[in-house]
């Protein structure tokens, strides 16, 4: 969590100076490559990458999920299927309107594919190899 908080602050600071950035979570798909390339010592592991640079074009900001979907006070509150459908419509429109990397999908299908796809089954063995959870 601390690494993510620090990275978010780095990205906010970079954006305040006109830079743009993106988090690269795919590093966890084969973290040993990064360990080898950077000669990382035991107990050091890559969590994600971040690319920063000067953008040569600006894009529409991706619509964010309404706060009411994820912030609950005092108790969990179910989100109605109708509200999810409205957000799916908004995301489908956003994905279809991008000048590059057009995607014919919505939030629900994208999220479902993300959790049903890659499982990163190698991560436990990788963490053991880095010195975590000594047996």
Image (spheres, grey):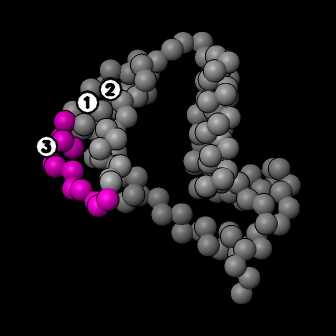
Mark 2 burial class by Cα count in 10 Å: few <14, some 14-19, many 20+: some
Q: Earlier in the sequence, mark 1 or mark 3?
A: 3
- Outermost front residue: 74
**Residue 8 figure quarter:** top right
Residue 120, above or below 57 = below
Q: Earlier in the sequence, mark 3 or mark 2?
A: 3
Mark 1 burial class by Cα count in 10 Å: few <14, some 14-19, many 20+: some
How far apart, in angstroms, are the residues tagged by discs 1 and 2?
A: 6 Å
Label 1, secondary structure: give it.
helix
Q: Residue at x 58, y 48 (%)?
A: 26
**Residue 17 figure quarter:** top right
Q: Residue at x 30, y 33 (%)?
A: 91
Task: Judge left or right: residue 27 versus residue 61.
Answer: right
Contact between marks 3 and 2 (CB within 8 A): the answer is no
Q: Is residue 60 magenta?
A: no
- Which residue is disc 3 drawn over? 82
Q: Quadrant of the N terminus?
A: bottom right
Marker disc for residue 90: 1
Question: In the image, residue 20 lies at what x, y percent?
Answer: 61, 24
- Which residue is disc 2 drawn over? 94
């Amino acid at each position: 969590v601390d690494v993510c908080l620090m990275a978010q602050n780095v990205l906010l600071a970079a954006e305040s100076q006109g830079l743009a950035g993106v988090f690269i979570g795919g590093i966890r798909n084969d973290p040993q490559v990064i360990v080898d390339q950077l000669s990382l010592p035991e107990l050091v592991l890559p969590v994600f990458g971040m690319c920063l640079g000067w953008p040569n074009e600006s894009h529409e900001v991706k619509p964010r999920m309404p706060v009411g979907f994820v912030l609950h006070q005092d108790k969990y509150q179910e989100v109605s299927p109708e509200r999810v459908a409205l957000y799916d419509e908004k995301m489908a429109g956003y994905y279809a309107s991008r000048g590059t990397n057009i995607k014919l999908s919505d939030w629900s299908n994208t999220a479902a594919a993300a959790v049903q796809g890659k499982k990163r089954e190698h991560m436990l063995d990788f963490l053991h190899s880095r010195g975590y959870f000594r047996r």
